[in-house]
Each structure stands twice: as C-alpha cells, then as structure tokens.
Image (cartoon, rainbow, N blue to C red):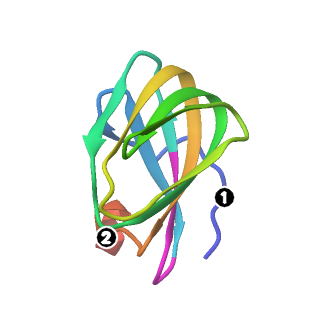
Amino acid sequence: MFYKKEDTGYRQLVPGVWMKTLVYGDKSLLTEFKLIAGHTLPRHAHIYEQTGYLVSGKIELTIGEETFAVSPGDSWSVPGNVEHNAKIIVDSVAVEVFSPARQDYLPPSKT
C-alpha cells in the first residue's frame, strides 16, 4: 500500500484534534494528527500500543504519571492500556503508529 500526500481526508476526533489514516496493514496503522493550539486530548487508554513522532509544533504529553514537553523531532511510545493525554501548546502535526491496527481508524470503505 502506498499513500500520496493530500490535504483532505481528516476527521475530527475531539475539538482541536484532527486525524487521518495514511497507510495500514494487518498488524499496524499509520496516522497523521493535526492538533490545534489551546485544545486538550482528554486522558484515555486503549488496547493499542501507540508510537509517535512530533513533526512540528509543541505539545505537553502525559503517559501514565510522566509528563514530557514534546518538541519537533521528539518521539514517544504509549503501551497498551496506559492512560495518556496531551495539551496542545501551539498548532502541531504528529504522526503515530498503532499496533494492532485500529479498526475504528480504518477508512470508511475498509471497515
């Protein structure tokens, strides 16, 4: 599977958090997040292992009880079933891999 960059296809997960699935396979899924300054991704947990990289911007990410000021080029990993949340300091772009592939993040034609 290949993906050609385009500016469409994002969906809002919560206010200020937009997500687009880029590519996926049987065991993993790659997403791009557009994050709007001043918003928060609420604390939550899920079964998926989540590994991310901040392309641009600045966020404050809490994984479990540890908080980290994330800048462009920084990365993180969230084990499955561990609570995490993010405060979006400035408009940001992040890419994240979920494993196993999240069925709820598959494009509508693939669910």
SS for dot 1: loop
- Mark 2 belongs to which amino acid? Gln
In the rendered image, which residue does mark 2 sit on? 103
Q: Residue at x 41, y 72 (%)?
A: 101
Tell which residue pokes out farthest to the front in this image: 65
Examine the rendering and report whether any part of residue 10 can be seen: no
Q: Rounded to the nearest whole Å, what is the CA distance between mark 1 and mark 2?
A: 21 Å
- Mark 1 belongs to which amino acid? Lys
Foreground pick, 74 / 102: 74
Foreground pick, 46 / 25: 46
Q: Which mark is residue 4?
A: 1
User: In the image, is residue 92 above or below residue 78?
Assistant: above
Among numbered discs 1 and 2, the one appearing first in the sequence:
1
Q: Residues within 10 Å of mark 2 (few under 14, many from 20)?
A: few
Asked if residue 82 is among those painted magenta in the image, a careful observer would answer no
Position of residue 79 measured from the top left corner of the image (x, y, whole percent): 42, 62
The boundaries of the magenta stretch are 25-32
Q: Could you say which quadrant of the image residue 16 lies in?
A: top left
Q: Which mark is residue 37?
A: none
